[in-house]
């Protein structure tokens, strides 16, 4: 749906599909970055405590 931008009847579906895909990609990338950073912080604190 996101790639069929110029077809008739697709005026609402195409922008919505682009927003959904962008949100999924952004969420995935941010989730990977945030989870990895939190994991590193927790491991550093555990190594300091031990």
Image (cartoon, rainbow, N blue to C red):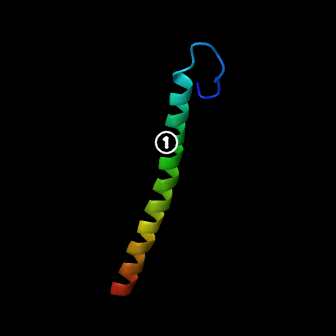
x, y percent for residue 44: 42, 79
x, y percent for residue 28: 50, 49
The crowd level at tag 1 (other Cα within 10 Å; few <14, some 14-19, many 20+) is: few
Task: From the viewer's side, name the closer residue of 31 and 6.
Answer: 6
What residue is shown at x 57% (from left), y 13% (from top)? 9
- Which residue of the protein is positioned furthest toward the top in this rendering? 8
**Quarter that holds the N terminus:** top right
Residue underneath mark 1: 23
Residue 50 visible somewhere in the drawing = no
Residue 5 visible somewhere in the drawing = yes
x, y percent for residue 30: 48, 55
The number of numbered badges drawn on the structure is 1
**Can you say whether 31 is above or below 50 in the image?**
above
- Residue 38 falls in image quadrant: bottom left
Task: From the viewer's side, name the closer residue of 29 and 40.
Answer: 29
What residue is shown at x 44% (from left), y 61% (from top)? 35
x, y percent for residue 45: 37, 80
**Can you say whether 2 is above or below 24 in the image?**
above
What residue is shown at x 56% (from left), y 20% (from top)? 11
Judged from the image, the secondary structure of the residue bearing numbered disc 1 is helix
Task: From the viewer's side, name the closer residue of 32 and 17.
Answer: 17
């Amino acid at each position: 749906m996101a790639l069929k931008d110029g077809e008739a009847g697709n005026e609402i579906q195409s922008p919505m599909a682009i927003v959904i895909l962008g949100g999924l990609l952004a969420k995935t990338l941010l989730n990977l970055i945030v989870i990895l950073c939190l994991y590193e912080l927790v491991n550093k604190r555990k190594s300091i405590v031990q």
